[in-house]
Image (cartoon, rainbow, N blue to C red):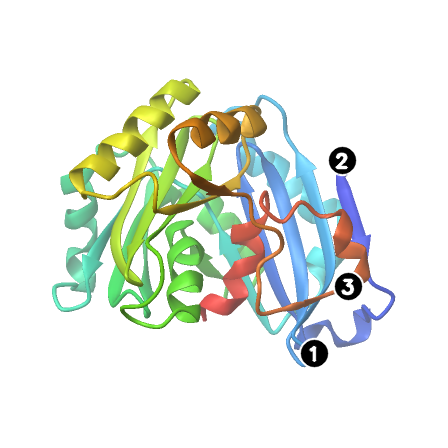
Amino acid sequence: MVPDLSVVDETYDTNITSSYFLSIQVDLDGFSFSTLDPVRNKYIQFKSFSFGKITPDELPGLTERIFEQNELLNLPHKRVFILLPSPYSTLVPSGLFQEKEAGKWLTFTHQLPPDQKIIHTRMKMADAWNIFAVSDKMINLFRRQFPEPRFFHQYVPMAETRLAISRPGAGRNQAIINLQKKYFDLVILEKNNLKLCNSFEINSEEDLIYYTLFVFEQLQLSPASIEIQVIGSHPDFKKIKQVLGKYIKHVKQPGLPGGFQYSYLFKEIPGYKFHNLLSMASCV
């Protein structure tokens, strides 16, 4: 498979990858991975592939082909982070969470497709646990490929990275929209406290506008004062961002995540599209 984007800094050293952090994101849209040198806190490699129109049943096979064809994914790494976006997720406050009850929490809020694996991840800054479901085949595939991969849902980098850099009780209210082809994720931070995490199915930009403004109304948030950051991947990304701007005053498209150094080659990488992938390393 031919990548859409591929950059490797000249300082990348295949002899010391066991000291590097590897981040991977895979879904029906594509497969992306990047390498962080934690000693310098610097991203030094990135590669992404687009899949086009595929079915969930085809995803494991395509992922396996990428493993076979990319040497960097077969080298040892100090840590491996896997982002598996999913519309099936819920948050439970830390005080209520019990590992043995994780499946019950998720099936209470969602009707899950067959052959799903339930994963849970602690969100330290939000003082909550993120419970989500992804393909059992994909989980098994990554566990065969890597000794101890850590799995993440998109809510974690969306919320945790922003909670970590702001002072409690301070700053403008924020909303983060993560666009996917069939749904979008909405995270609301109010005075740097996590107010809402939710996902909504969409078929057009009108659906996104409706759900976003409905949430604002329910939470009594002013579209004139709140700031929205739009990230993610969608065929009509620019159009959706423009339409949002008609209803909400402060709509931004962020670049590469803060808190890291980047190889000069990363100027080619659209930060908004891979924001969650490149934020995972700050969530541990």
Check whether the beta carbons of the residues at disc 1 and disc 2 lie within 8 A of each other: no
Badge 2 amino acid: Met
Asked if 236 appears above or below 233 in the picture, the reply is above
x and y, in percent, of residue 86 in the image: 39, 40
User: 279 above or below 2?
Assistant: below
Q: Residue 270's image quarter?
A: top right
Residue 113 visible (yes or no) = no
Q: Amino acid at mark 3?
A: Ser
The structure residue drawn at horizontal position 27% and vertical position 68%, both measured from the top left corner, is: 169
Residue 198 vs residue 17: left or right?
left
**For this rendering, which residue is in front, 86 or 247?**
247
The tag on residue 153 is none
Quadrant containing the C terminus in the rendered view: bottom left
Circle nearer the N terminus (2, 3): 2
Q: Position of residue 225 (x, y in %)?
A: 34, 46
Pick the front one: 177 or 108: 177
* Image disc number at residue 1: 2
Residue 62, quarter of picture: top right
Q: Give the residue at mark 3.
A: 263
C-alpha distance separating marks 2 and 3: 24 Å
**Mark 1: few/some/many CA within 10 Å (<14, 14-19, 20+):** few
Q: Amino acid at mark 1?
A: Arg
Residue at image point 53% right, 32% down: 28
Q: Which residue is mark 1?
A: 40
